[in-house]
Amino acid sequence: MDYNEASRVVTEYIKSPTGHTTHYLRFLQALIVELDVRDARARDFPRSVTAAKKMIKAEIHINIKSYYHARGKGQAAIVNLKYPSKAALQRALKEVSHKKRAGLGWVKDKGLQVLLVLL
């Protein structure tokens, strides 16, 4: 899976999030590729939902609203939005007013709750 295919899969999932495990795993894998965390051919590329979630929680720290709006501008634009750590993301989010953050309902409607962090 390359960036273009990953982006297409994520876009389709965001339009209509489903709970089916096969679709969800493919979405999580596409998210990992789109955010340039791992290449799909890597030996440690996740092959299960649990492994994919663990990798995302450990390695993807991004403002969901910024990510959503940067989609379509290319992988470099998305990757530049990533924070080096969960703590750095949490600090940045605390500085943003509640009105500028993505609401929980909106995040769930888009199926992006895997990217949520606690503040």
Image (cartoon, rainbow, N blue to C red):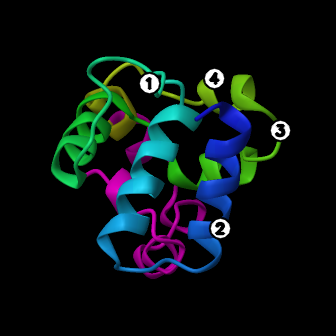
Which residue type carries mark 4?
Asn
In this rendering, the label closer to the viewer, 4 or 3: 3
Which residue type carries mark 3?
Lys
Q: Residues within 10 Å of mark 1 (few under 14, many from 20)?
A: some
Residue under circle 4?
A: 80
Q: Residues within 10 Å of mark 3 (few under 14, many from 20)?
A: few
Distance from label 4 to label 2 (Cα)? 23 Å
Q: Residues within 10 Å of mark 2 (few under 14, many from 20)?
A: few
Identify which residue, 10 or 66, lies in the foreground: 10
For residue 115, side relative to residue 99 (left or right): left
In this rendering, the label closer to the viewer, 4 or 1: 1
Which residue type carries mark 1?
Val
* Magenta part, dominant SS: helix
Kindly state the secondary structure of the residue where label 4 is placed: loop
Distance from label 3 to label 1 (Cα)? 18 Å
Residue under circle 1?
A: 37
Distance from label 2 to label 1 (Cα)? 20 Å
Let me know if residue 32 is in the magenta part: no
Residue under circle 3?
A: 73
Q: Which residues are magenta?
A: 91-117
Which residue type carries mark 2?
Glu
**Rendering quarter of residue 47:** top left
Residue under circle 2?
A: 12
